[in-house]
Amino acid sequence: MTRVFVPRDVVALALGAEKIAAAIAATAKARGADVAIVRNGSRGMFFLEPLIEVETPAGRIAYGPVSPKDVASLFDAGFLNGGTHALRIGKPEDHPYLKRQTRLTFARCGITDPLSLEDYAAHEGWLGLKRAIEIGGAAIIDEITKSGLRGRGGAGFPTGIKWKTVADTKADRKYVVCNCDEGDSGTFADRMVIEDDPYMLIEGMTICGLAVGATKGYVYCRSEYPHGIKAFNEALGHARAAGYLGKDVLGSGHAFDIEMRVGAGAYVCGEETALLESLEGRRGMVRAKPPLPAIHGLFQRPTVINNVLSFAAAPFILAHGAKAYADFGMGRSRGTMPLQLAGNIRYGGLFETAFGLTLGEIVEDIGGGTASGRPVRAVQCGGPLGAYFPPALFDTPFDYEAFAAKDGLIGHGGIVVFDDTVDMLTMARFAMEFCAIESCGKCTPCRIGSTRGQEVIDKILAGTNVDANIRLLEDLCQTMKFGSLCALGGFAPYPVLSALRHYPEDFKPHAVIAAE
Amino acid sequence: MPAVFDVQRAQEIIDAHLALEGPLLPILHAFIEEFGFVDDAAVPQIATALNLSRAEVHGVVTFYHDFRREPAGKHVLKICRAEACQARGSESVARHCLADLGVDWHGTTQDGAITVEPVYCLGLCANGPSALFDEEPIAALTADKLLGVIEEAESA
Ligand SMILES: Cc1cc2nc3c(=O)[nH]c(=O)nc-3n(C[C@H](O)[C@H](O)[C@H](O)COP(=O)(O)O)c2cc1C
Ligand code: SF4
Ligand code: FES
Ligand code: FES
């Protein structure tokens, strides 16, 4: 019997993976070939999806991007034995895109069947949890702190400090909440975790539960991820049935269970306090801090709230020790960051690497420039609230502090590339429009300012008092930056101001640009 | 999905969720799943069951983009309008799709077959433009590809 891997990651599905799997099964049957189809996760090389793999005595051999009509010719070429074909990639692990990565968090991704507990255990699964049970709460937090792990959701807050605060706060109940709202355009790493390696998140959250003394965890996932929601719920069921979750986790005497909750299309619910409001069943309005969620969080109880990737780093750190993680990275940015290369980019996908590559290396060397083949004009980093970087800033190293020094943010690691056809005034307008659509409405600069921002930009577009309106726009941005409660209103000015600073030639009436 | 609201079925759904912590969003999602929309008549019903004011429930229903208050078409098509898809030409592809269907954003085709909504990122950002047709994800969207998907759904 030959095992053929056809990914179940939504990128592969969106490019026809179901039809490919069906065609392989049907063709194998017709030709009398003994084939077992495994639905693995994605390797994260999205430019090669659907990427199918065949298990041969010489290792797994990949073919991609495959379409259903290629299946017959793959059989003709003897792909079940790794035969030559125009789509043959060779061993995936030898592909330069994977070879150049440091996969700590995404080590299993694409290799295993995401829902197989057997696969997970065979690939270092549960080692972190087992060690966590052995060493106990204080030592777990010590490891996380020493690893230097900083929150991967955006703000980069030290994870160990957060866990310690919750551990030190006495209460009748505590919660672990996972932020899987992943609202930033250009990001998909959280999605890949819940679809392609869900037990890793379960393990990470359980480690946290043990560390802080919480017995209940929630994963709050955006509704835009229906496939991830299904996969993760299925994984929860298997993990519970096998005793990794429940009243007595792995016989440790500790209880911990996880429930998945689904958002309802509000970007602001990715903000941690709005997320907690939403979980409690209210409008996703941002809460003023303090009190910190670590002290008064979900249902007023001490709550750890972390991004998916922060929890997902915990099993590796516990299994291999803090130093093994902290050895990667630069400055105060330790470990690896799963970069997400998106937009108009030739080699889009997930690229996990130690901090410190320059933006230019990421976009040009790894990403291969634009998909359209035109010159790169702008790169937006860190989601819709992140600044636009021009190629002139490509020497900026990918690191929390280095980006902040350039008025940018690395956020959740999304990198969105635009070619030279982009109109930056339109992108600036979109930033304001998005802020207006998604504002929770609590503060005036964000709620009203974003709408005023669109109007001012429309005036610039139309050629009305252009210089005065540009000054007004700058002024408005300052008001939003300093007068907003959360980073939605507070950071929406960054894409606008960076567009204005680096692309002033676009801030003209469009009739004038057309005439030039 | 039946686009008719049924008080009795609604009560069953509410009751099935009462044991949850923070049951309101799960209830509203279940209504969307069952009826395709949240009928105004459901608001007082939920409020009573959860011991909330009508205003609180109304506030929640109207806050979230997902909780549609009118019946939708037989299929819901969500087209991504976020930056990474824009960088791959999503706005012009979307304009073509809308023109082909003869609707604007949030509109439903005349035959009631398809409602089109904007969405801001589906996590397919390296393979845009992206869309979700009911639960079927579509990458590298073109107007032609969309017509193919619709045809297939209609003939299924
Ligand atoms: C408007 C807004 C949206 C946010 N969206 C997300 C999100 O989708 N996912 C996430 O993990 N954090 C998001 N954050 C950051 C969270 O508020 C919070 O910092 C994070 O969940 C903490 O986890 P971490 O320490 O592991 O990063 C958002 C913040 C703001 C202001
Ligand atoms: S800045 Fe905007 S989203 Fe944030 S709290 Fe204020 S109104 Fe709400
Ligand atoms: S009275 Fe508060 S914003 Fe108008
Ligand atoms: S921006 Fe369209 S799928 Fe992410």
Image (cartoon, coloured by chain):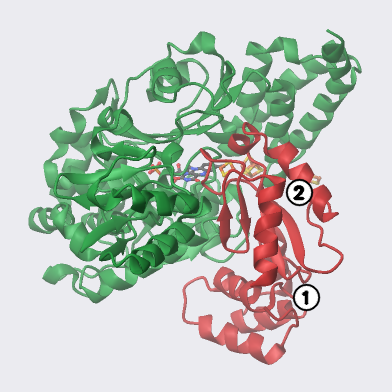
The response on whether ligand 3 sits within 8 Å of label 1 is no
**Element marked by disc 1:** loop
Label drawn at residue B40? 1
Q: Can you tell which quarter of the image residue A44 is in?
A: top left
Q: In the displayed image of the protein, which residue is found farthest to the left?
A: A134
**Element marked by disc 2:** helix
The residue identified by callout 2 is B97
Chain displayed in green: A
Which residue appears at 18% of the width and 73% of the height?
A: A248
Q: In the displayed image of the protein, which residue is found farthest to the bottom?
A: B8
Instruction: Measure the alpha-carbon separation of dots 1 and 2.
Output: 31 Å
Which residue appears at 58% of the width and 35% of the height?
A: B84
Left or right? Give the position of A242 relative to A460: left
Q: Chain of mark 1?
A: B
Chain displayed in red: B
Residue A293 makes an appearance in the image: no
Left or right? Give the position of A255 relative to A372: left
**Same-chain check, marks 1 and 2:** yes
Amino acid type, callout 1: Asp
Badge nearest the viewer, 1 or 2: 2
Q: Can you tell which quarter of the image residue A255 is in?
A: bottom left
Of residue A396 and residue A416, the one placed in the foreground of this image is A416
Q: Is residue A181 above or below residue A24?
A: above
Which residue appears at 59% of the width and 18% of the height?
A: A374
10 Å crowding of disc 1: few (<14), some (14-19), many (20+): few
How many callouts does the rendering have? 2
Which residue appears at 34% of the width and 69% of the height?
A: A29
